[in-house]
């Protein structure tokens, strides 16, 4: 009982409405539909006010964690994002990226503990851009916001996270990402030991969370562990540790809230299959990896190809079929205007015979 | 199989549940004074072989305790059986006897 409910000790305040939205710099490439899905869900389905300023930049977190960007520089870049928010009249910041969320949290804590660094940053920003800024009243990650509205999404749900054929709840592995709650456990729902932000969504939408031994282990991204090719063996070893731990529980899919984790848990499955022939899903295939926006989008009845799910390394069709999603398999690689966007080579972790079964249009 | 230019690093964690500890138990049963080792490292500090090779008696002892025999046996062949370690051991452990016993017991590994 302690394990199941102890997440409630770690709660955080999440703003109800009027968010200033900052994007991730890598997510647009890996899972391009997710950020748009978040905006569509927030504005269209939940009727919330989300403002985005096209002038906002990368938080430079990847450079910071790779020892390229100094602390003073990243503080000034973050201060500029806050300045854009202040100019737009918003007070609640919501970030698409876990690394950015960790950076914002870390910098706000640094400014609180060492006020002289805040003054220095104000001075640097003013000298460089002539801008001033206010400290945000509330900083949340997009998954916090979706978690906050999970019951409203459940009320509007067109599909549940259940197997359409058997009526059994889908078995879901959730992975929250180290920078969400491991830096400041009090800033994450459930803290770092009993993360509940994704588990809460899964439970509200009818699924069952798999609590496997390596649930809290890092995906292996680790910035410099991936950025240098000779270090990638360390990165992929971490992902393999997780896959080996979760595979016996036969999860239907993995859901992540960090751009890096989503990418690595998806793409390292391909690498491991091609490198050493190991696969962790049923029938020698991979385990589909979803972002929480994609999961919310499927529950709300969005078209999987509009959510960008054709960009996944591990094919998602087995999951869509299991959930009973109404979709057109043949238009998987057709873009918005019906133009062929290209298709990947057939790989071990994919459905392999997908062309044969679904007659993919080119 | 595709060569990505990197492999999968092997974990350095030791799984005591899967390692075979029977041989280690047999060694401790034959030479129970080994249980008195407090890992002070005097044996390693005085080791002649350790001065010219990577041989480290304390490390080998730890490997055997953990059931990591493969590396231990290869290391043991570096010992010259001079017995200086036995002279300095504060617990009076028959270290040379340990070396011979480990070589005998781990011959298969």
Image: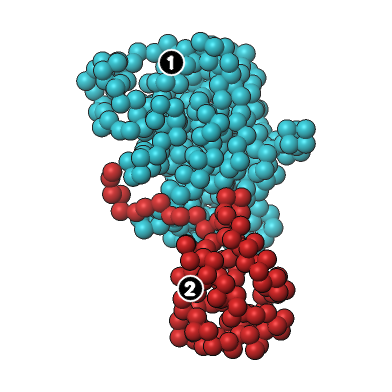
Chain colours: A cyan, B red
Given residues A84 and A181, the one toward you in this image is A181
Q: Chain of mark 1?
A: A
Residue depicted at x 42% and y 11%: A326
Q: Quadrant of the N terminus of chain A?
A: top right
Q: Is residue B83 left or right of residue A308?
A: right
Which is more foreground, mark 1 or mark 2? 2
User: How many numbered discs sit on the rendered protein?
Assistant: 2
Q: Are marks 1 and 2 on the same chain?
A: no
User: Badge 1 local density, few (<14 within 10 Å), some, or many (20+)?
Assistant: some
Given residues A66 and B39, the one toward you in this image is B39
Any part of residue B80 in sight: yes
When asked about the image quadrant of residue A145, the answer is: top right
Given residues A342 and B2, the one toward you in this image is B2
Furthest-left residue in this view: A362
Q: Is residue A312 left or right of residue A7?
A: left
Estimate the x, y position of residue A45 in percent, counting from the top left: 54, 17
Estimate the x, y position of residue B50 in percent, counting from the top left: 51, 83
Residue depicted at x 63% and y 85%: B86
Q: Secondary structure at mark 1?
A: helix
Residue depicted at x 45% and y 39%: A265
User: On screen, A92 above or below B2?
Assistant: above
For residue B13, the mark is none
Estimate the x, y position of residue A16 in percent, counting from the top left: 65, 27
For residue A321, the mark is 1
For residue B75, the mark is 2
Any part of residue A292 in sight: no
Q: Secondary structure at mark 2?
A: helix
Between the residue at mark 1 and the residue at mark 2, the CA separation in whole angstroms equals: 56 Å
Residue depicted at x 50% and y 28%: A253
Estimate the x, y position of residue B67 in percent, counting from the top left: 57, 60
């Amino acid at each position: 009982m302690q394990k199941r409910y102890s997440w409630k000790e770690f709660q955080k305040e999440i703003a109800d409405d009027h968010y200033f939205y900052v994007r991730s710099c890598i997510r647009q490439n890996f899972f391009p539909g997710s950020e748009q899905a978040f905006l569509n869900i927030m504005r269209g389905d939940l009727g919330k006010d989300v403002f985005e300023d096209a002038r906002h930049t990368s938080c430079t977190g990847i450079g910071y964690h790779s020892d390229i960007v100094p602390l003073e520089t990243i503080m000034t870049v973050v201060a500029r994002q806050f300045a854009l928010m202040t100019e737009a009249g918003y007070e609640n910041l919501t970030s698409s990226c876990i690394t950015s969320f960790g950076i914002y949290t870390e910098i706000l804590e640094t400014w609180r503990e060492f006020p002289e660094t805040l003054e220095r940053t104000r001075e640097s920003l003013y000298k460089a851009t002539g801008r001033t800024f206010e400290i945000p009243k509330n900083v949340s990650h997009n998954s916090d916001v979706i978690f906050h509205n999970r019951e409203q999404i459940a009320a509007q749900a067109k599909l549940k996270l259940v197997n359409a054929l058997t009526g059994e709840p889908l078995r879901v592995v959730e992975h929250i990402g180290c920078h969400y709650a491991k830096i400041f456990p009090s800033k994450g729902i459930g803290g770092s030991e009993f993360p509940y932000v994704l588990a809460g969504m899964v439970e509200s939408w009818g699924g069952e969370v798999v609590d496997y031994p390596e649930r809290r282990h890092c995906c292996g991204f680790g910035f410099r562990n991936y950025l240098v090719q000779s270090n990638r063996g360390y990165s992929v070893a971490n992902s393999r540790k997780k896959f080996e731990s979760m595979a016996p529980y036969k999860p239907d899919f993995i859901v992540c809230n960090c751009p890096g984790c989503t990418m690595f848990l998806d793409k390292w499955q391909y690498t491991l299959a091609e490198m050493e022939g190991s696969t962790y899903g049923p029938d020698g295939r991979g385990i589909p990896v979803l972002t929480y926006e994609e999961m919310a989008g499927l529950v709300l009845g969005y078209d999987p190809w509009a959510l960008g799910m054709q960009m996944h390394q591990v094919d998602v069709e087995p999951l869509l079929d299991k959930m009973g999603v109404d979709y057109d398999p043949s238009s998987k690689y057709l873009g918005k205007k019906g133009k062929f966007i290209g298709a990947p080579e057939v790989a071990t972790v994919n459905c392999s015979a997908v062309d044969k079964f679904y007659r993919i249009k080119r | 199989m595709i060569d990505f230019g990197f492999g999968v690093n092997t974990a350095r964690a030791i799984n005591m549940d899967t390692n075979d500890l029977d041989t280690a138990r047999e060694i401790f049963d034959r030479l129970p004074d080994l249980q008195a080792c407090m890992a002070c490292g005097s044996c390693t500090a005085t080791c002649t072989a350790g001065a010219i090779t990577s041989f480290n008696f304390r490390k080998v002892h730890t490997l055997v305790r953990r059931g990591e025999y493969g590396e231990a046996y290869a290391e043991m062949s570096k010992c010259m059986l001079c017995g200086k370690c036995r002279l300095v051991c504060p617990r009076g452990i028959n270290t040379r006897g340990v070396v011979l016993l480990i070589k005998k017991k781990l011959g298969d590994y």
